[in-house]
Structure formats: structure tokens, C-alpha cells
Image (cartoon, helix red, strand yellow):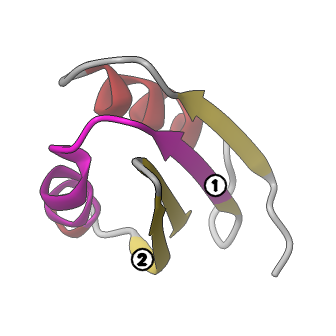
Amino acid sequence: MEINLKVDATGLACPMPIVKAKKGMESLSAGQIMLIETTDKGSASDFPSWVNRMNYQLIKTEEAEGLYRFFVQK
């Protein structure tokens, strides 16, 4: 999978990971993929909801040792 944009939102609390993700997605073209990394536990539920509301596609999620990674296609 080709990642077109990586966004680091580690150490940020809600709502900043979503704010950074929104800005990142605005810079992408349709079909491109963003990886966002966050340490905010709320992201596990926030990101799937946000992706659904924005009509993006959540390709994959990963969680390991408090790091959450979301692969989102525009």
C-alpha cells in the first residue's frame, strides 16, 4: 500500500488528532492514502466515526503499545 501522506498526531489530545487528519485529507486527491498516528485512546472510536461521516474509507487500523495507526483513503 502506498502512503501519500503521514500525519504525526502523537502526544495530542482530542480533538487535535481529528483536526490534523482533516487538514491532511484536504491536501490529498481522491484515491490517495493518509496514515495518521496518534496516542490518544479516544482515537480508537473517534476515527472510524469521523471517516464514516466524511465518506472516506478506513483501510486499516493498528494498535500497539498505545500507538494507534489509521490508514484512510480519500
Q: Left of 5 or right of it: where is 72?
A: left
Verify whether residue 29 appears in magenta: no
Measured Cα–Cα span from mark 2 to mark 1? 10 Å
Query: Which residue position is annotated with label 1?
Result: 34
State the residue at coordinates (15%, 44%): 42
Magenta residues, start to end: 34-51
Q: For the point 80% across and 62% down, which residue is it?
A: 3
**Element carrying mark 1:** strand
39 horizontally vs 26: left or right: left
The kind of residue tagged 1 is Met
Which percent across, then down, holds residue 1? Answer: 81, 81
Above or below 42: residue 50: below
Which quadrant of the structure image shows residue 11?
A: top left
Q: Label 2: how many residues lie within 10 Å, few (<14), some (14-19) or many (20+)?
A: some
Residue for badge 2: 57
Q: Amino acid at mark 2?
A: Gln
Task: Identify the image quadrant of residue 16.
Answer: top left
The structure residue drawn at horizontal position 63% and vertical position 65%, both measured from the top left corner, is: 30
Which residue is at the front of the view, 72 or 53? 72
Asked if residue 11 lies left or right of residue 5, the reply is: left
**Camera-side residue of 11 and 32:** 11
